[in-house]
Image (tube, coloured by chain):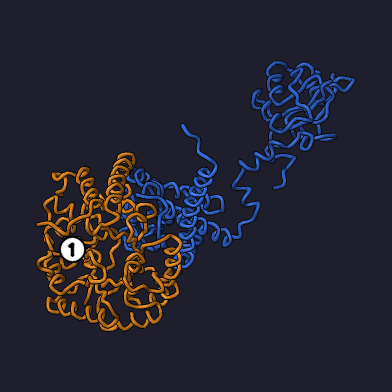
Amino acid sequence: MAMPNKKNLRRGAAKIIKEAKDVLRIEAEGILNLVDRLGPEFAEAVHWIYKTRGRVIVTGIGKSGIVGRKIVATLNSTGTKALFLHPVEALHGDLGMVSPDDIVLALSNSGETEELTAILPTLRSLGTRIIALTGNLQSTLGRSSDLVIDAGVDREACPLGLAPTASTTAMLALGDALGVVLLNRKKFRPEDFHRCHPGGVLGERLQVPIREIMRIGSSVPLVKEGTSVAAALEEMDVKELGATLVVSDSARLVGIVTDGDLRRGLYKYEAILRKPVEAIMSPNPKTVQADGSVADALGIMEDHEITVLPVASGQGEIQGILHLHDLLGKGHIRFEP
Amino acid sequence: MVQSVTPRGLIGSLALVVDPQEREVFRGLDSLIARLQPAVAGLLLDPMFWCPDVDHCGPVTPPLLEHVIRLVPATFPLWVRITGTTAEQTIQNRRRLETICSRLNYSGPLAWVDTPLLYHSNRGLPEHYRTLLAETPFNLIADNNPQLIGKLKIKTKRKNIRTAVLKRIAEEPRLVGLLHRGDLRRVMNYQRAVRRRSDFFIYDASERSFLERPSASGIVSVGANLLPDEWRAITLASLNLDEGSQSQSARFRHLWETGLKVRTLEKYYKNAPARIIPAVLAAWGLIRGQGEPLSPGEQKAVDSILAHLPEGRAGR
């Protein structure tokens, strides 16, 4: 087989780039088209959603359904309660999730999607307001909705309707516009965003070194070997961690007493308070090193089903202590967003 | 009250094949309309396209319009070519055809179609269209057809309607659409020019363009005379008007195969559709007699189409 020469390769690349640019131009024009056609009905839709006590129920099928799911994600991320309703599932019982206070955002380029138009009468009978995002204002969807937002484009970039391109991009962009405008109206703050994204914040926290969040110094519950259970109980009560470490005379970690150990001790000994802590402590507890990450500590806690973890050097010298809540930012150590 | 519906979708350019002996008689008109009408959103009557000699082609004649109006339902959209050799003659053509509409008490969704640059420059076009539309109750669709203008014996300075001119003529609310053949950049400029008119439609008049980057308004198709159902399926899919009706994989496969068939045929007739398509229709027995003699290349194209679609396949 003859190898293509450089000139042919260049020509081939130029053709590919031209075709790609055509697609991008068509999609960009589709959005610019919306800019000029955006009317007061969009502002009305924002007003309705802003004022509603209910949720935004987004519905659509096929590619419009995929766009709908992204709009749900955008709205939820920016402080507007939203959920996706599949039109077919709606017909099989999911319509029960819709309440009169909700606002339905229905997506269909043609506005004639059978599965979608089939649920419109029920939605109307529920008293739910319907906002249509469609490229066909005179369609069944358009005519059955309380508000119609024009999502029409002049041209698609893909032949034969195999993959809607400009029309789905336009709908997606309108969904983004809706989310962002609502975000501004709600005066959504960075801390609100973090509240909506615990996964993201937690992800960041998991990378934090243990030494940055561990409890140190006088906040570490600590008793020496030979101390009575009564004294250990007092230490646990004061330091509020549900546990105390037990150290040797040379300050090496030898054990830990937890609420669980106390429970078991109460069952085992009648005069438990006068017993030395060694009688009820768990010897050689699991530890983590200060150079490890929060993820490491969390892994140990999960594996051994414990909530308190001593931080010690390789030689058993105590450096601090961690509680599960500290890892999650809910305890003594809090994370700034 | 005149109906002012502007259809979206497939507009079939009805094959108008003149009988060489009787210039006013179009061969097989009734059977062609019966074949095409159920598949299309509207019919274009464009003798200028189907006439072999562009410099001597006229607009739709009153007898032709009367015949078609009597054949199609009163609510069926008709687009009617009125272009003359001068501005005055174009207005005169429109008046002559309107007398037919009045006589038949016809008030259907009819729109005039005009290629202004065939007889008028860009300069003064808004004023001309204002005059053209002043007396008529029907809408108008402009045709931007650089290929046709390029074939004229008298060469013109510009082959395309200027974007700024389109913007001005689109201020006239009864100019409701544009037929466009040409490059993507130009049509995007046109789109921008008329963007504030949500009721203005830009149709692809080039089948090849529509098959690659379909206009959301629709297509004026000559190939629909050969494959009406296939063109209908492709147009509905391209305009996303048939979503969700059947399983996606079956639908895509059907569309892909249909698209391939339509593209293949378009390649055969694209160089001389006005001569090749009537010859195929005659070979299928849909129109009587022989047309003008074909060149060897045209005959080869006809034979290729017939090999793909033998006679028995032609009926709807």
Residue at the location (86% across, 19% down)? A248
Residue B284, percent from left and from top: 14, 50
Question: Where A308 falls versus B201 (above or below)?
Answer: above
Chain letter of the orange region: B
Question: Where A128 falls versus B58 (above or below)?
Answer: above
Q: Which amino acid does label 1 sit on?
A: Leu
Instruction: Tell me where residue B134 sits by quadrant.
Output: bottom left
User: Circle 1 marks a residue in which chain?
Assistant: B
Residue at the location (80% across, 25% down)? A312
Instruction: Tell me where residue B76 sits by quadrant.
Output: bottom left
Q: How many marks?
A: 1
SS of the residue under disc 1: loop
Chain A palette colour:
blue
Q: Which of A336 and B301 is in front in this view?
A: B301
Residue A281, percent from left and from top: 75, 19
Residue most extreme to the front:
B296
Whether residue A278 can be seen here: yes
| Residue labelled with disc 1 | B16
